Image (spheres, grey):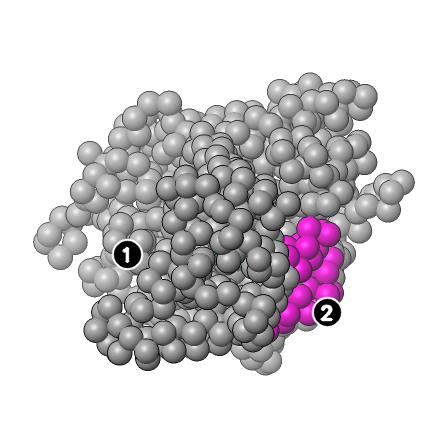
Amino acid sequence: MPLTETGLKQPVKASAADMLKININPVPDDQKVEAAIKHLNELGQKFRSLMLTFESCVKCGACAENCHTYLGTRDPYNIPANRADLLRKVYKRYFTPEGRFFPRLIGAKDLELEDLEKMFSYFYQCNECRRCALVCPFGLDTCEVTMAGRQLLHWLGMVPKLHAAVGAAMAKTGNHTGLTKAGIVDTCEFLEEEIMDETGVEIKIPVDQPADILYIPSSADFLLNPNTMTGAAKFFHYLGVKWTISSEITEAGNFGLLFDQRATLRANCMRVIDEALKLGVKKIVWGECGHGWRAGKMYLPGMLDRPGRIPIVHIHDEVRYYIEKGALKLHKEVNSRPVTLHDPCNFGRACNMCDTLRVVMNACVTNFVEMTPNRERNFCCGGGSAILFDDPEMYDLRIKFSAKKAEQVRETGVGKNGDGILCAPCSICKAQLYPMVEEHELGVEVKGLIDLVGLALYPPLNK
Amino acid sequence: MTYFILQILPYISVSVLIIGLLYRMGRWASGRIVHNITLTPAPTTQAGALLDIAAEVVFFKSLYKADKSLWSGGWIMHVALFSILGGHIMGIGLLGLQFYYIGLTSEHTSEYLSNLLGTSFGVVVLLALLYLLYRRMAINEVKQLSAPSDYLHLLMLIAIVTVGNIMRFVPEWGIHYEPVRDYVANLLTFTPITPDMEVMHKPLFVLHLLLVQILMIYLPFSKLLHIPGMFAHRWIINRPYVEPAPGMPGVAVGGTGHAVSGGQSASGGVQ
Ligand code: HEM
Ligand code: SF4
Ligand code: SF4
Ligand code: SF4
């Protein structure tokens, strides 16, 4: 789908029935504009970062060449400042003196229904990667505008089917893939057998057991990235800690961050904390997921409506801690294929994790090649904020958004013999990159970081 | 008209500037920093964060890393503009004797230096502004971003600077520091100006002042809000960032057990 009548590229929208499942009653078309203006006012008044971004941009264009979506498509609306302008023009028109009296002069405009469709298109072409904030002379964060825009669209009932479905699955089962407890237990048993076959060691993946550690995996790790799940299991087993996953919350991701930073974000945060309290754990360890960790680390403390007393850390930080303590014996020689690292934007620019990724990487592999730019200057994979749409037109955009990434990977040369590894320690990066490395013929295999840790801790028998 | 521009408008423009800025900044202040959106890597102390912000303000650090040509034009323009603003205060307030007062030079040299610096920065800022204007028209992306006001801001500054430069280069159209000082003193003490004052008979000076006052009036309602906006926004995203120390319950490492994060962490208090 669908070229709409206006020629906009849009993901498939959730139906009214889909929206009801995430507790939104869509606003009828003839009332949308009025409702949107009201919501925009509320958002502007609440978020200082948003108001500042609306009022301080000098239109210098420094952000343009730094957004991979613009680099990949050369669509002017994908210039971050222009993307922000979709809302900024309207905000100025209704809520600033200059926009009220001189709209033409300063480029402010009345809101029309068509603008909302345009927002739906371009706010869902933003990866919320914050590279624009990094380069802007004032640090203006177009990601904040995208988030506000998506929030507004959500309240109007305009959410991609993908996001709405994930939201509904999360509310129902505590994970994005809709896995039930039986399914989770089955999968874990299967993964335990895999570990046994691979390493000859008996390693358990406890589900709903009394424990000290609650591990929050990404649900994609059960099916799509099993080596990340088994890697984590090997790590905990190696340390000998009492750990468990909970069938109530097997999801590191939090789509609330991406389309609804009120009810959905909070509900998902509370779900983690409630479950940790119920199990009586002493610590929560977060799995490999970029935006999820951003939500868990940066947003969760502010979303809780009671004191959060259980420490929450990321598994990468844990691994680093034990590496630096010299507590892990890592057989890095098993990971001798050339590896490059894709710094997930959320880890790099929002969660301060670049150093950690490198400490872990260097301890686990023998042939690590940095891509450029790297660390906080890295470009997004093009899947950020889960715009992993499959319909041909949106899929084509995903290829374009990942063009910069492909160029970076190619320049490292890790894939030139076809046996390279692209380490992308984030579930969404992985979901985007699995097909993209094929589309761009990069000659690399996509893996998580914990996968490599697991391999180095318990070398496979056939190695 | 001259009388209006010199006697009445200044009080209006200064009031609008101050009240306008307070209004805008008050609106910002009523919004909240809802979430922790610190841009990382970030320093671990408040001092470090302030240092980062200072580097952004003084050197435009992020812009330097991102876009060297815009940085050159932009940074030079701002430094020259800032020097000129300072120069106005020094020239008019101290009659160009600032270097003499701090004991660096003789009276005469100080005045000479002051003039030289003023003239040079006047030319530099003009060139930088012309480059920014060229850039806005020549670079496709920037052009696509620009509204009419974006060009007008630059043209306005170019006009102010050009008039200022003409006053420098054509002495008979220019004006000395003393009469301007007397004029400003009158304004500050609410003493009426008189028709025989020299400022009343210098059309270019009147024009220069008129343009500046127009700029002051629209400043709080334009993108020039980036001046306070820069500080306000950096205050949100350039913050100290404290890591929780890891270490799991139930495993002793190297005999030392596990560290806790001292109650301070981005992932909530640890007890
Ligand atoms: C504090 C750090 C500041 C930064 C990082 C900054 C940055 C910028 C940038 C990037 C531009 C855009 C240039 C363009 O049009 O392409 C600009 C324009 C401008 N800035 Fe600043 N600025 C700062 C402070 C100031 C201050 C203190 C003043 C006033 C004294 C000022 C006055 C202006 C003016 C007059 C313009 C021209 C508007 C235009 O270009 O359309 N700025 N600034
Ligand atoms: S870099 Fe910042 S100020 Fe410049 S156009 Fe982009 S958002 Fe606006
Ligand atoms: S957040 Fe990323 S994708 Fe979105 S506008 Fe900024 S640079 Fe582009
Ligand atoms: S998907 Fe990965 S690279 Fe892309 S925004 Fe998330 S963290 Fe960034």
Residue A316 in the image: x percent, y percent?
Answer: 36, 54
Residue B237 in the image: x percent, y percent?
Answer: 42, 48
Q: Would you call the spot at circle 1 few (<14 residues within 10 Å), some (14-19), or many (20 or more)?
A: some
Pick whichever, B242 or B228, lies toward us.
B228
The vertical placement of A158 against B71, above or below, is above
Mark 1 or mark 2, which is nearer to you? 2
Residue A53 in the image: x percent, y percent?
Answer: 55, 44
Do marks 1 and 2 both belong to one polypeptide chain? yes
Relative to B60, B136 lies left or right: right
Magenta segment range? B127-156
Q: Please say whether residue A306 is visible from this viewpoint.
A: yes
Disc 2 CB within 8 Å of nearest ligand 1 atom? no
Pick whichever, A316 or B109, lies toward us.
B109
Residue A265 in the image: x percent, y percent?
Answer: 50, 31
Residue depicted at x 43% and y 74%: B115
Residue depicted at x 58% and y 74%: B170
Residue that lies at the very extreme toward the right in this rendered image: A5
Pick whichever, A28 or A242, lies toward us.
A28
Q: Would you call the spot at circle 2 few (<14 residues within 10 Å), some (14-19), or many (20 or more)?
A: few
Which chain hosts label 1? Answer: B
Relative to A98, B80 lies left or right: left
In the picture of the structure, the residue carrying the numbered disc 1 is: B48
The question of residue B142 being in magenta is answered with yes
Whole-angstrom CA distance, mark 1 to mark 2, is: 39 Å
- Which disc is residue A300 wearing? none
Counting residues from the start of the chain, the first of labels 1 and 2 encountered is 1
The vertical placement of A159 against A452, above or below, is above
Residue depicted at x 57% and y 71%: B172
In the picture of the structure, the residue carrying the numbered disc 2 is: B138
The kind of residue tagged 1 is Gly
